[in-house]
Amino acid sequence: MPTSAVSLDPQARKVLDLGRQAHEPPFETGTPEQARRAYEEGFPGLQ
């Protein structure tokens, strides 16, 4: 798979890093209901 050399905004990088550190499955691997619940529960590490 090709990769690109695009710079990522530092805040976007923080969101991705916190998601990886949570040790939870990514949104795209779950059901829509699971993704909604995770979104609604919020991201305490970002507040």
Image: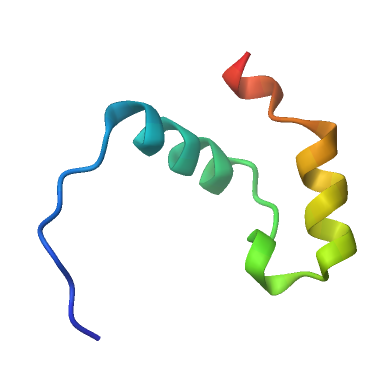
Q: Is residue 23 left or right of residue 1?
A: right
Residue at the farthest left position: 5
Q: Is residue 47 left or right of residue 2?
A: right
Whether 12 is drawn above or below 32: the answer is: above
Q: Is residue 25 left or right of residue 5?
A: right
Whether 31 is drawn above or below 24: the answer is: below
Residue 18 drawn at (x, y percent) = 53, 36
* The one of 12 and 45 positioned closer to us in this rendering: 12
Residue occupying the point 85% across, 59% down = 34
The quadrant of the picture occupied by the C terminus is top right
Whether 46 is drawn above or below 25: the answer is: above
Q: Is residue 25 left or right of residue 35?
A: left
Residue occupying the point 69% across, 29% down = 43
Q: Quadrant of residue 12?
A: top left
Residue at the farthest top position: 47
Residue occupying the point 46% across, 43% down = 16
Whether 37 is drawn above or below 35: the answer is: above
Residue 20 drawn at (x, y percent) = 53, 48
Residue at the farthest bottom position: 1
The quadrant of the picture occupied by the N terminus is bottom left
Residue 9 drawn at (x, y percent) = 27, 34
* The one of 40 and 17 positioned closer to us in this rendering: 40
